[in-house]
Image: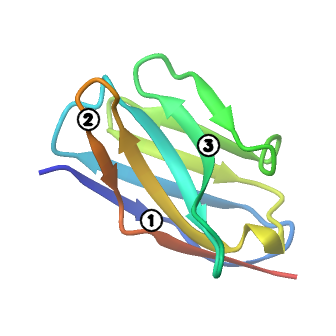
Amino acid sequence: QVQLVESGGGLVQAGDSLRLSCAASGRSFSAYEMAWFRQAPGKERETVAIIGWSDGSTFYADSVKGRFTISRDVTKNTVTLQMNGLKPEDTAIYYCNAYSDSDGGDYWGQGTQVTVSS
């Protein structure tokens, strides 16, 4: 049974930093892309950052480029999102996702709330 468990959300002030972690278990993720999505109230879920599990290649949404960093630890099966220079518009529920085209896997965590006050 695949599980993605997020942690690290909270309430911070604008300009502060937060580090989100996603603990992944239940299968090998070598063929997967791991991603962070977010959904703000009244808005659609959007991609924040993506990392290839095997090669570590990354993608960032323009809105977080230069402020957020995604990384993975293949020995600990974790994916981390380091968020610096947080802005009120970063307020959302952040979700960890594991996706693979090759085997059709698409798994989601339960989400963690990030609130940035101005």
Q: Secondary structure at mark 2?
A: loop
Q: Which mark is residue 104?
A: 2
**Residue farthest to the top, as pictured:** 55
Q: Amino acid at mark 3?
A: Ala
Whole-Å distance between the Cαs marked 3 and 2? 20 Å
* Residue under the image location 48 percent in, 61 percent down: 95
| Left or right for 63, reference 77 | right
Image quarter in which the C terminus is found:
bottom right
Other-residue count near label 1 (Cα within 10 Å), few / some / many at <14 / 14–19 / ≥20:
some
Q: Which residue is mark 1?
A: 7
* Residue under the image location 63 percent in, 81 percent down: 41
Q: Position of residue 19 (x, y in %)?
A: 60, 57
Q: Position of residue 30 (x, y in %)?
A: 30, 23
In the image, residue 3 above or below residue 26: below
* Residue under the image location 52 percent in, 66 percent down: 8
Disc 3 versus disc 2: nearer the observer = 2
Q: Which mark is residue 80?
A: none
Other-residue count near label 2 (Cα within 10 Å), few / some / many at <14 / 14–19 / ≥20:
few
Q: Which residue is mark 3?
A: 49
| Lower position in the chain sequence, tag 3 or tag 1 | 1
